[in-house]
Image (spheres, rainbow, N blue to C red):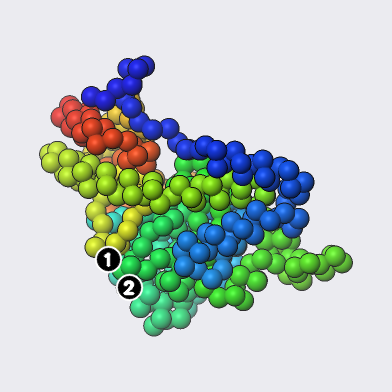
Amino acid sequence: MSKNSRGVLDIPAWPQFGDAERAGLLRALEQGQWWRMGGSEVDSFEREFAEYHNAEHILAVTNGTHALELALQVLGVGPGTEVIVPAFTFISSSQAAQRLGAVAVPVDVDPVTYCIDPVAVEERITSRTRAIMPVHMAGRLADMDALGKISTNTGIPLIQDAAHAQGSEWNGKKLGELDSVAAFSFQNGKLMTAGEGGAVLFPKGEQYEAAFVRHSCGRPRGDLRYLHATSGSNFRMNEFSASVLRAQLSRLDSQIETREERWPLLHRLLSEIDGVIPQGRDERNNRNPHYMAMFRVPGLTEERRNEMVATLVERGLPAFAAFRAIYRCDGFWETGGPDETVEELARRCPVSEAINNDAIWLHHRTLLGSEQLMHDIAEIVADVVATL
Ligand SMILES: *Cc1c(COP(=O)(O)O)cnc(C)c1O
């Protein structure tokens, strides 16, 4: 095993940082203007992040949850509307819709990619559906061809929850070329980070302008007379965060390359373990940034899975239980869910139900480690599975 001098597995730390982040923070500090209306770091970051995704318009915001909320609002989501979301996701996907007074309608996910199932989406479209939210789980893109077709046929826009998908590609296209809105997160664990932060990619300039006004308390750009033309809130990113994110963006490609090299090896080694099935990938998703190394141990109960996670952690791995199906969280029901019981939703979402119990993920920093580390991880997982 590859252990470091303290006798623990040699897994790279996260977040990674260096002189570029230090220089950025000092630059922001010495500007003497620490908010975006006075400084230039947020503007520069938006431009650079847009260029990276071949997108025309990117608006930086406070965090990924706000990014989703703002994007949904710009798409017309509000009271009396519905947003279709995958049942297997981080709760922000549904919370963003619910904060706007809309109903979040959970549908099942694909058993291979753990991303929203387009057939299940079609079944749940009603006259009230105002948006469809594919979540790119662990960087794997949802089936953007099938979802794009549904969107074109129905006129219902897609809003990509791309919190895990910076730098992901579909058929050689970057996220800015997929003709739909996408929301990113820069929270501490994400693929690039300033501790907290978010961004929204808009294909249309009018959408970006509408979002800009709303993310700054409804104030038109340059307003000095407190006009507040629309409702809104303060979702503005600060200059320090943007300066760090510019540096983080410059690290992203080489980190993706390392993870793209490591994952096929880890995937093969995990596949060879009896009872373990690693997360799969749609071939059209030609580039994957690998947020999380996920696998299932089908047949585990939630309790046994949680025990397995605890044992993996004891053995030195940054292992976690997968997201709970959103309708199994009390908070999901607080503002009124769809007109169904948990049992009915569970019957409609058998894959999410299974993953809810049997999926485990490892932090993406594992995939920045050595080839030897992939062997060590697989050995530990095999040991633990053998004792189940
Ligand atoms: C992290 C995350 C978010 C929310 O991002 P924050 O920046 O933490 O608010 C949204 N969706 C998914 C799938 C996430 O993992």
Image-quadrant location for residue 170 = bottom left
Q: Is residue 20 left or right of residue 89?
A: right
Q: What count of labels does the image hold?
A: 2
- Quadrant holding the C terminus: top left
The residue at the point 67 percent across, 40 percent down is 26
- Residue in view at x 32 percent, y 73 percent: 146
Q: Quickly name the residue at label 1.
A: 284
Q: Can residue 76 be seen at all in this image of the molecule? A: no
Q: Residues within 10 Å of mark 2 (few under 14, many from 20)?
A: some
> What number is the disc on residue 145?
2
Residue at the image position 38 percent from the left and 46 percent from the top:
255
For residue 64, side relative to residue 4 (left or right): right
Distance between the alpha carbons at the discs numbered 1 and 2: 9 Å
The crowding category of the residue bearing disc 1, from other C-alpha atoms within 10 Å (few below 14, some 14 to 19, many at least 20), is some
Residue 15 % position (x, y): 48, 38
Asked if disc 1 is less than 8 Å from ligand 1, the answer is no
Residue sitting at the far bottom: 153
Camera-side residue: 217 or 79? 217
Q: Residue furthest top?
A: 6
Q: Secondary structure at mark 1?
A: loop
Judged by depth in the image, the label closer to the viewer, 1 or 2, is: 1
Residue 186 in the figure: left or right of residue 378 = right
Q: How far across and down, in percent of the image, does residue 353 sit?
A: 31, 50
Q: Amino acid at mark 1?
A: Arg
Is residue 161 in view from this perspective?
yes
Are the residues flagged by discs 1 and 2 in contact, CB closer than 8 Å?
yes
Residue lying furthest right = 225
Identified by mark 2, the residue type is Asp
In this view, the residue in front, 299 or 236, is 236
